[in-house]
Image: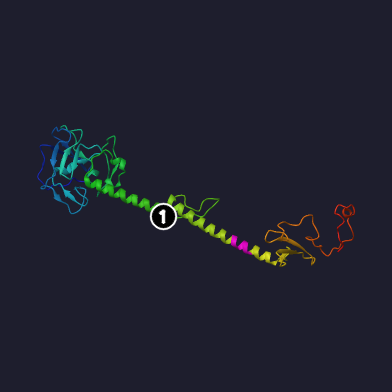
Amino acid sequence: MAPLTPHWHQPSHPAIQEVRVAADGAHAFTTKSLARVALPPFALFAPMSSPPCTPAAAPTYATVQVGRDQHINLNSDLLYINHSCEPSLIFDTSSRTIWVGPRGLQPGDELTFFYPSTEWDMAQPFACTCRTPSCRGRISGARHMPREQLAGLWLNRHIWDLLAEQDAAQDAAQQQQQQQQRQTTTRPENGTSSVSSAATRPGLDGALAHHMMASVSAAEAAYKAARDALDAYRRTLPSTAPAATANGNGTKTVVLPTSSASVPAASTNGRGHGQGHSPANGSAATIASVAGATRRGPTSRELSGEMGGDTART
């Protein structure tokens, strides 16, 4: 590429800068700037004042970015200061000043600055040939560089602001992606959970609570259905239990299903025959014949006199 044809008086900074132009083939040229002064670290090298600097309508390879959407034309030999990943100068766009870098300057040192310190998205990216140990390779602006490649270098305020906005946008996109993953469920296979592995604790707890409530409701419905079925089955069975009837004298008589004979039950008021106790020894006064059975004479105990011979035939 042919060097930019200057429209300003040259040399523009003869006391501090020497510009060299070298032919690199038939139609290619390279330019570089050398220091003509010795300056300590962070000393003032040159101002970027206006004039000669003017606002640029659009960014080009010859402009310098001085704000979020602001660019300027240098309109001087400062344009020939090349890029380096280990620069000798600092372009401070907030104060419109060029400072000496942390190593200081000696006559003959090449004048360079780190282009991504001012440029967010360069109009013409290029492969860096600074050959320094920390060379970043392709240079296309701070927007496209990993944070570790920007670490340790001086950056302008508008670059820091744009980097912060970029980080915030990336964080928001990541959070949105995680939210979508939490809301996504996968089909269970081989005993795996139906809840996405990316689900966070609040989403997982909500899903478990929902499934547990559904399980409890289903269990309650199943229990009620089983209980209703059991009750219906019991109503179809014949009644085999003895029924208790009142005989009007304060006692209950248990009616046996095979006979009209009955056995008096205990008194409902806790007293037998009004004497405060129940009859003992199975006397005929309290025991009725069962199933129509009759006495066939004295028993062996009666004949032996154990029962006093006071049995009576019925």
Residue 114 vs residue 17, the one in the foreground: 114
Which quadrant holds the C terminus? bottom right
For image coordinates 68% across by 66% down, the residue present is 235
Residue 200 visible (yes or no): no
Amino acid type at image mark 1: Gln
Indicate whether 30 appears above or below 278: above
**Residue 224 belongs to the span the image colors magenta:** yes
For image coordinates 51% across by 57% down, the residue present is 213
Give the total number of marks visible in the rendering: 1
Q: Position of residue 293 (x, y in %)?
A: 85, 63
Indicate whether 240 appears above or below 203: below
**Residue 197 belongs to the span the image colors magenta:** no
Residue 172 in the figure: left or right of residue 116: right
For image coordinates 59% across by 60% down, the residue present is 223
Other residues around mark 1 within 10 Å, as few (<14) / some (14–19) / many (≥20): few
Q: Which residues are magenta?
A: 223-228
The residue that mark 1 highlights is 180
Residue 45 visible (yes or no): yes
Residue 8 vs residue 183, the one in the foreground: 183
Residue 287 in the figure: left or right of residue 75: right
